[in-house]
Amino acid sequence: MPIITLPYAYLERLTGVDKEIILDRVPMFGADIERIEEDHADVEFFANRPDLFSPEGVARALRGFFGLEEGLRTYDVRPSGITFSIDPGLAAIRPYLGSAVIRNVSFDEESIESLMGLQESLHWAVGRGRGKVAIGVHDLDTVRSPFRYLASPRDRSFVPLDFEREMTLEEMLAEHPKGRDYAHLVEKFLRFPLIVDADDRVLSFPPIINGELTRVTTETRNILLDTTGTDRKAVMTAVNIICTALAETGADVESVTVEGVEMPSLAPVERVVSTAECSGLLGLPLTPESMAALLRRMRYGARPLDADADAVRVQVPCYRADILHDWDLFEDVAIAYGYGEITADLPATFTIGREHPISAISGAARTVMTGLGYLEAMPFTLTNERVLYGRMQREQSAGALRLLHPISEEQTVVRTDILPLLMEALQLNKHRELPQRLFAAGDVVSDLVTYQTAAAVSIHPGADFSEAYAAADVLCRELGLDYSAVESDDPAFIDGRRGDIIVGGKKAGVFGEIHPGVLNAFELEHPVAALELDLRAVPGYPGQPGAPSPGVR
Amino acid sequence: MELTLNEKRLLVALEPLGPIDAATLADRMGARKEAVVQYALLASDRGLASLEKNIRTVYSLTEEGQKYAGEGLPERQLLESFDEEIPMRDLQQHPLARIGIGWMRKKGWIAIKDGIVSKTGTDAPGADEQAFAELTEGSVDTGLSGIADLQKRGLVEETETVRYTVAITPEGRALVTKGLDLREEVGTLTREQIITGEWQNLNLRRYSVEKLPKRVYPGKNHPYQRLLDEMRRILLDMGFTEIQGGIVQSSFWNFDALFQPQDHPAREMQDTFFLSENQQLPPGYERVRDMHEHGGGTSSTGWGGAWSTAKAEQCVLRTHTTCLSIRHLAENPKPPVKAFGIGRVYRREAIDPTHLPEFEQLEGIVMDEGLNFRHLLGFLREFYAKMGFDKVRFRPGYFPYTEPSVEPEVYVDGLGWVELGGAGIFRQEVTAPCGIEYPVLAWGLGVSRLAMLKLGLRDLRHLYRSDVEWLRQTPVLAGRLEE
């Protein structure tokens, strides 16, 4: 999540509140303070509140939260007379464009930095890494309206930001740092998005890089904003957040005509919400008046609806992209009320607890194995085929689940058996005192189905088939299994010293003395008696866990 | 003070004697000398006997020296083999010539001129010869002059002998006079001795409680499993039904049913383990689709855009246990529902001391008519109190599937306020497609972090490493939640 740098002096000036109070109260507003420094704090705001990704946005919200300035902040928008056209050829590439003009900005190095920070945070939170929305900020006075957003041939060239020579669009993808980072967003298209002015000079190659021509500097007085993307709503959210943040610094926002549509309006969206529903959800005794007052502290326009005693008419500011549902407003009511002021209460809901049968079965297996002196291990469920099959001298399981994008060579599949992981645990503990007896009971996955097995190993100079058979026998008997044992052909065990556990005519487990080849593979120097049992064979195990998923009613 | 039988025997043997050589005593007691010295050492530690160690240096002839015994040193024998003069050539024929000629010259007994060896007349026996003569009679332990020269010539060797002298002290004598029980000690009681009553006549060996016993270790549940079991018991006590489910889930249940937008960063391959397998969408999935696209029949706007069936069908390793909660609710939409689950979840994270690609999560839900946010806080407060955290505070939080959301923090001595899990009321966008008409309170907890706090671990990997030493040494009651 984006971390916003909040300079105390700037914030104190914008809110009129001491930094101590700000630092004390900000967490109760919905933020995590990451670092407190001499002159600033680094604060993490939630991903759903991109309007708080700038100090100006934070100040606007805090002025309300502290009760200094409540209700809706309105923004005047005058038409700029500037126009944009959109090439229909972009429909399948990057169809949407949002724009605005912001006049009378006054930048120093710090505020340019802050604007770039906001832009990057929006690229992450709203733009989804520039795919959904990419933002360009230009010095308006270097170019001329009308502007065109077009699908350009790939060999068109211009001077990109931070370079001194002209490059073709294709060269930029290969050579410009930003080109390399974001090439994947456009390289599949025959033509690339491009923004040019009345004189066919290039402003930007969205979503990759702006031109050097329109670079914003401390001399810049007027800004042209472009946001391009694949989602109309997100494109406008970015425009609204940037325009309102700059307006908070005293700049003037003007609208642009894009394909005949005047934008942005920066007008609020209206919602009429029920006080009873809000009171019911929060458990607070609210009236339309008290609820409206709380909403105004969160910078909404809000007043009780005259005709209906239960309702509040809410004006949602244009920068609040997170308000999808009435309950989103109710949460803000709770925040304004203060989470610390809400008394906790236990409901009367009466139910009787019930353990899951799989837990009961696994628990019983644990009781038996610990009673035999075995220590419980809890190995990872992610492992690799070398451990599961190679070192165990076993055939690869067809049902093993392979990760599409594993994070390391050690963890490429989900375990289909637990025994190999216990062998690995013995390897890790080979310098520890013998005898060692380990067991584990837990999930395995085969053919997408999750089920449980219990496995055990015993290593010491006297470990043998008889020990393994005795342990398997008592585990089966204690779990109520009606089993028989037949000679096994599992290559992980020594021929003539291995058995399969058969329940209801099906193999449910294996036990015996581990093959010396396997011992060598795990660098073990003493015999190992081992077993593994499929807990689905245990009476009372619930029916098909891989059953079709429930319907959505 | 408990004497061993052997010490008692030693004291009894010593009692009528004065100081005595250990070897002699051993003969009398019919024991080995080393054993007697050992008993005497124990008895002397108790002040009942004294043990004196004497080290004596003894000189004796070596094998070569023995050859000359009686005959005299080679140079003496050689000197006596001729009269006044002898040609060197003839003298060299003598068997001792090689050793003897040099020594005769060195001692000044002879002069050699023009191939003729002649006696000088100075040939009195030196200190070395006198010592040699004495050593021929037997070993000596005094430092005779001349021995050093013989040692250098390899004719004499030096050996050390150790002798022990044992004596009884007045305390020891007093003890013997009082009488000592000299019956044979018995270690293990036999069945025979127990049932025949013979045990009444036995001298059972006494053991010292000061010497620690050999350590043994019981079979035990894993410390982390014990914590998980304690949490399970707490939630069962609170009336919750336990739920379990598959590790493999469709994106539909893991994300879409929880109103996670399809372009949410968590749904990208760098955060989640995707699988090549697909799972068919359940009947009624269209209601979830509608919710994403336009908010269905609720006050929601939805996320907008087109919802992809293919994206929803793709399987993942579950990224949270919340998918189990929503599946349980979809199967049980009628109130009341109180359920919890503990299970492993998977995130595509590189392994380091505080991050693992798999870890346990605990999840609880309560659904009933009339439930509200205050009840959520009530459950949380109760739950954390049961976990041993009496000081809890609530802060606003953000989770994609709850609204309102809350981040509970607990106060831990030495650490301050620690964020421990997340909670909220399921969004209507989540509950409405499943036909749920009442609020669902939900909370989740990263229990592996809780286990680290409770077990005092700095490295999360320790929980899964199966270090036998740690498992053996961690007490069964370590990290108990309710103290």
Image (cartoon, coloured by chain):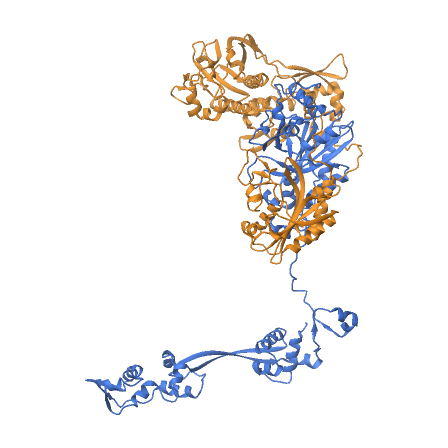
Nearer to the camera, B26 or A317: B26
Res B386 → quadrant: top right
Left or right? Give the position of A95 relative to B147.
right
B259 relative to B364, above or below = above
Residue A388 position in % (x across, y down): 58, 43
Measured as percent of width and height from the top left, residue A503 is found at 71, 45
Is residue A461 or residue A499 the one in the foreground? A499
Which residue extends farthest left? B114
Colour assigned to chain B in the rendering is blue
- Describe residue B200's horizontal placement relative to residue A523 as left or right: right
In the drawing, does residue A28 fall left or right of residue B128? right
Instruction: Decide: is B345 above or below A515.
Output: above
Q: Is residue A533 visible?
A: no
In the rendered structure, the colour chosen for chain A is orange
**Quadrant occupied by the N terminus of chain A:** top right
Residue A371: x, y in percent?
71, 52
Tell how many labels. Answer: 0
x, y (%) of residue A431? 56, 54
| Quadrant of image for the C terminus of chain A | top right
On screen, A484 above or below B57? above
Query: Would residue A277 be seen by someone viewing this image from the given angle?
Result: yes
Q: Which quadrant of the structure image shows residue B339?
A: top right
Taking depth in this image into account, of A467 and B230 the one nearest to the observer is: A467
Q: Residue at x 72, y 48 (%)?
A: A483
